[in-house]
Image: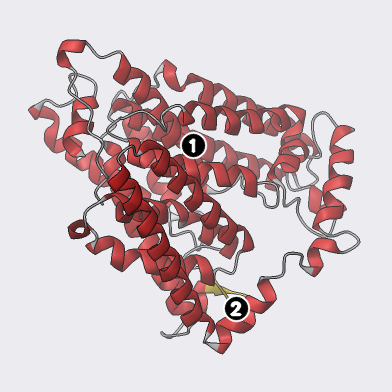
Amino acid sequence: MSDALTAAAPAGLLSGRGLPLRRLGDAALWLAVFLGGFVIAEPAPYELLVALLMVIWLLAGLKFRREIGPMMVLLLLFMAGGIMAVPFARDLPAGAMHMAISAFLGATAMFYAALVSERPVRIEIIERAYIASAFFCALLGIVGFFNLIPGGELFTLNDRAKGTFQDPNVFGPFLLLPTLLLLRRLMTSPPSAWGLALVVLPVLVLGVFLSFSRGAWGMLAVAGVVLYALLLVNEQRPARRLRLVLLAGAGVLGVVVLLVAALSIDQVADMFEQRAKLVQPYDSARLGRFARYSLGFEMAMERPLGLGPLEFNKYFPEDEHNVYMKAFTAYGWLGGIVWPMLMLWTLVALGRQMFRHRPWTPFAQCLFAVLLVHVFVGVVIDIDRWRHLFMLIGLAWGLIAADKLYDRRPRQTARPPQHASTQA
């Protein structure tokens, strides 16, 4: 895929004189994405490195192209809504810090979008780093869950694997994109290219399972089906379609075998029995998750500027656990309107690439499926502070911009697009 992505890069970016500096920048980008999976304490190394890289790249002349303008405008409006809500916070310093972190995450989305739109080949670097990060994160979660090393409890929470995250409900969704990238490779690449996927994919799937996050389980299942549907629709050759069908059957069988093996362990079976219930006690209680949705929206409709950041749990036993309601309560009506607009616009704009043959189409298809399930899981959990989500939004808009720039290339310099699987 490297040659095809390099051909898609804007002219003037591949001069030999800039090569050593570019390699240093690529290495720094790889490290930043890799560190995105290690958020045990805050501020995490990821924040510190990305903040430094943003300053350096901006000073070096990083361009924010007009093609990513819609995302930038919507993110700025979202943050503006949050800033206007800050004065309503009872704990003003905590509320201000909450919004400062949200603004930083929004800036990271703009940063990734600018990097990818400037040089689409960076998708390959990001993919490699993300897969490596997810593998080590999942491995530590598995090791911690089974207490295979001293201090393994550091990687668990309430008997659930959380890897190098603070919450299992973030740990599971973080693993989704690398899982789909490797799953796609198995379905589209020759067996000779399956080596890495066969080693890493079971670790990632087991990591998602041991997070015992019902949201992550559903996200993985739905995202896998969406990706599979995209591959079937795009594949016109009967032999290849039959191959996809057979591989899907083998994949389902493999997952079943993996789960049966895991459930044969009493520790896993007991937790699965507890977490597999569709409705938990804290969902259906008098002021449980579902009751809070109705009451919270009623309160938000009475306050155009919101309740203030971190205020919802002062009225109710817990936080919103619904990003769309939180957008109204913590970011005001402005944020409540803008957040779904941002997610819907991103999906529609990226979705236009699902049936085009671009050098980055394999990555874009996996990214689309993962973003789609994040939109749905936002109904039952707050995702507005997930670092990886803002990176995914930025990558999506970087590819949206790259697609528009790809179409504008002079015909005489354009090379035939290659529809190849990405390499980790």
- For marks 1 and 2, give the CA distance: 31 Å
Residue visible at 46% across and 82% down?
261
Name the image quarter holding residue 416: top left
Residue visible at 8% across and 29% down?
16
- Above or below, 392 against 291 in this view is above
Residues packed near mark 2 inside 10 Å, few (<14), some (14 to 19) or many (20 plus):
some
Can residue 310 be spotted in the picture? yes
Q: Which mark is residue 305?
A: none
Q: Give the residue number, with chain letter if any, for mark 1.
A: 393
Mark with earlier residue (1, 2): 2
**Viewer-proximal residue among 415 and 22:** 415
Residues packed near mark 1 inside 10 Å, few (<14), some (14 to 19) or many (20 plus):
many
| Quadrant of the snapshot with the N terminus | top left
**Viewer-proximal residue among 368 and 101:** 368
Residue 352 lies left or right of residue 239; in this view the side is right
| Label 1: element kind | helix
Q: Give the residue number, with chain letter if any, for mark 2.
A: 159
Where residue 82 appears, as percent x and y from the top left, is 69, 34
Can residue 391 be spotted in the picture? no
Where residue 402 appears, as percent x and y from the top left, is 34, 25
Residue 267 lies left or right of residue 89; in this view the side is left
Residue visible at 48% across and 72% down?
256
| Label 2: element kind | loop
Where residue 122 appears, as percent x and y from the top left, is 28, 37
**Total count of labels:** 2
- Above or below, 2 against 203 in this view is above
Q: Amino acid at mark 2?
A: Asp
- Above or below, 224 against 198 in this view is above
Residue 137 lies left or right of residue 286; in this view the side is left
Q: Amino acid at mark 1?
A: Ile
